[in-house]
Amino acid sequence: MPRPAVAELRDPVSRVPGVGPVRAASLADAGIETLEDLLLYLPFRYEDRSSVRPIAGLEVGERCALEVKVERVQRVGRGRRARVEATVSDDGGALQVVWFRQPYIADSIAKGDIVWLFGKVGEHEGDLQLVNPVLEKGGGLHVGRLVPIYRRIGKLTPGVLRRLIDACIDLVGEVPESLPAATRRRLGLIERQAALGGVHRPPDDADPRVWNAARTAAHRRLVCEEFLAFQTALQLQRSRATSEAAGRPMAFDEARISAIREALPFELTSGQDAALRTILADMGGRIPMHRLLQGDVGCGKTAVAGCALLAAVTGGYQAAIMAPTEILARQHARTLGPWAASRDVTLECLTGNTGAASRRRILGALAAGELDVLVGTHAILEPEVSFSNLGLAVIDEQHRFGVRQRAALRAKGGANQQQGWPHLLVMTATPIPRTLALTVYGDLDVCTIDDMPPGRQPVVSRVVPAADWQRVIEMLKATAQRGEQAYVVAPRIEEGDDELAAAVRLEADLQRQLPGVRIGLLHGAQSHDEKLAAMEGFRAGEIDVLAATTVVEVGVDVANATLMVVGHAERFGLAQLHQLRGRVGRGSAPSTCVFLAHEPLSAMARARLDAIRSSDDGFVLAEKDLMLRGPGEVLGIRQAGVAGLRVGDPFRDHEWLEATREEAERLAAAEDDESIDYRRRVRRYWGRRFATVQAG
């Protein structure tokens, strides 16, 4: 059979032998459409199957590779319950092998065949046995080396993916270089071809520890390549906005700033005041503001944003603030409404559940310029929402949105290009380390509120063994008896379970164990009316204890809530634990957060719980999370601008992220042919992901 013609990276994945329409569809669902996509689907770990053991030295419980001769093989039973039994041997002895529900194996091997096996040694009726081992004739792909292990895609098992990716490497042949030669030298990177081949085909002398830590030259090249393109795109986006100088300048003198601040029922802290002055200075410039406001949970970012919204209106423009949930959007409308009314500023709230008549009225007033401030959810991004003169767009809880969504909101004010682009302010209560702020938010200027409003008492944090649940029940009773309120948060407990079921079970348990205490239920699957009724009942003091899912994590503000109980706290990351704790301690009464820990605890979970108990500083916890973070766990900002990263992990690879930032700045400005060509390719790829990075 002739060897297939050498393919190009942009060719469809269906060119790989073994990829038919069904497999191609499964791969496409995972974002794998081209040969390059397939090669960039990296192993999540490596398993050492290189050391061949003699049968005579095997021990129960060990995982091992064997090169053996098949002495006997037979299929036993029929249908789904069929099994294959075999006896294999080497110079030192014989071993029994059994495969359950894999009847086809009986047809793939025969007496006398030399095969490779890899599996865990077990015991059956006193004899050693291998159960369902990996089987390979000849070895070299699935056994006999440091083997890459891929995450399953639909029905495509790690073994199938290994075979397809290996075939893809041969099919592509020569891989063109994608980075300028000078960039490779400065960053110390190997060639792309060596990296793409090496990450899937570790060398014979590969150290499993280094490969499993993703710290090889091949990993470094692919991670830096991706980070570099991402950050170059951010630089191009930033320089484009700056060079166009198409903002909407607003003049703010001290008298106007004082008048805006007087709309608030409290004094701003020094941190809030400094942040507001920075934001107003940006809004006074001709370059559109593109700023991130970050601060710890409860520091008062909404007050600063409210002042900025009022400032935009006093400057003759409309303003909008978008929140990730309807609960938070309505809370903002409730908070900002009186401030706006005190300055004769009109404000409305628009969500996906706004009634048809109200929606028509709001959209009409907005388009006619009769509505000053629009508060809402993703509904603001719908095509029929049209502003007359949007001057400021604010996005709350930025980590819940992506780059595309914030660009789409900003574009709502771009209809009249003669007036320029609106200013953009995004906010996050998920503090991130400075290194990551400079890179993950590379297209934004960053300012931080570094203090807390007066009168707030620190929340006492306790880690309580789940076995002491009765102690928690007594705390809930005491809280209700004092006239205060509590949250109890239920996560998903078992694989296949959902938060809804967990919350419903929790509500039933609390009803039974807290007679006379008013119990409420809040979860994401409730209808619009049910969610609002639950939250309004809790806010009005008609509910003593709210059994909830993590829907309460973001922004919910009830000053009378003084107790938070987090079930299965070991399952959460530090950032989410800190966010949940931030739902209490928002009034002047002492507050407590109980983290229920279910044994056995992993070392990582124990370290997280120790950290959350010992610190209430979100920035300290962010640094701690960067050090502690386990595989797959992020700080909650993966959607904050890193959507689209397939290879690099900003937390695991943070030192490479910073190393590529300076090079990205150089490439964004350089005028040599290689740099210009590189920028063209970056625009072509990331332009589909960043609405404001234009192709061309």
Image (cartoon, rainbow, N blue to C red):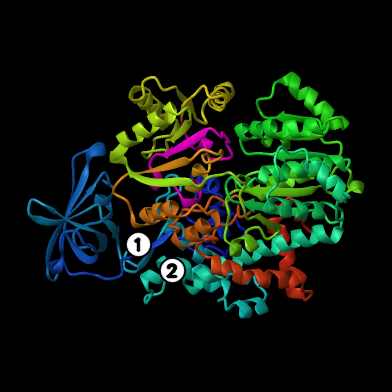
Q: Which residue is mark 2?
A: 201
Residue 155: x and y, percent?
Answer: 42, 45
In the structure shown, which secondary structural element does the residue marked by tag 2 occupy? loop
Find the magenta span and give its range: 547-576
Q: Residue furthest right?
A: 418
Q: Nearer the viewer, residue 684 or 12?
A: 684
> Relative to residue 518, is residue 323 drawn left or right?
right
> Relative to residue 311, is residue 613 drawn left or right?
left
Residue 544: x and y, percent?
Answer: 47, 26
Q: Which residue is mark 1?
A: 142
**Residue 483 to residue 207: above or below:** above
Residue 550: x and y, percent?
Answer: 49, 38
In the structure shown, which secondary structural element does the residue marked by tag 1 occupy? loop
Whether residue 412 can be seen here:
no
Q: Nearer the viewer, residue 51 or 479?
A: 479
Q: Nearer the viewer, residue 660 or 200?
A: 660
Amino acid type assigned to the residue bearing label 2 in the image:
Arg
**Residue 3 to residue 320: above or below:** below
The tally of labels here is 2
> Relative to residue 647, is residue 46 drawn left or right?
left
Which badge, 2 or 1, is on the more N-terminal residue?
1
Residue 437: x and y, percent?
Answer: 62, 60
**Residue 340 to residue 48: above or below:** above
Residue sitting at x 74%, y 64%: 680
Mark 2, Cα crowd under 10 Å, few <14 / some 14-19 / many 20+, is some
C-alpha separation, residue under disc 2 versus residue under disc 1: 11 Å
Whether residue 414 can be seen here:
yes
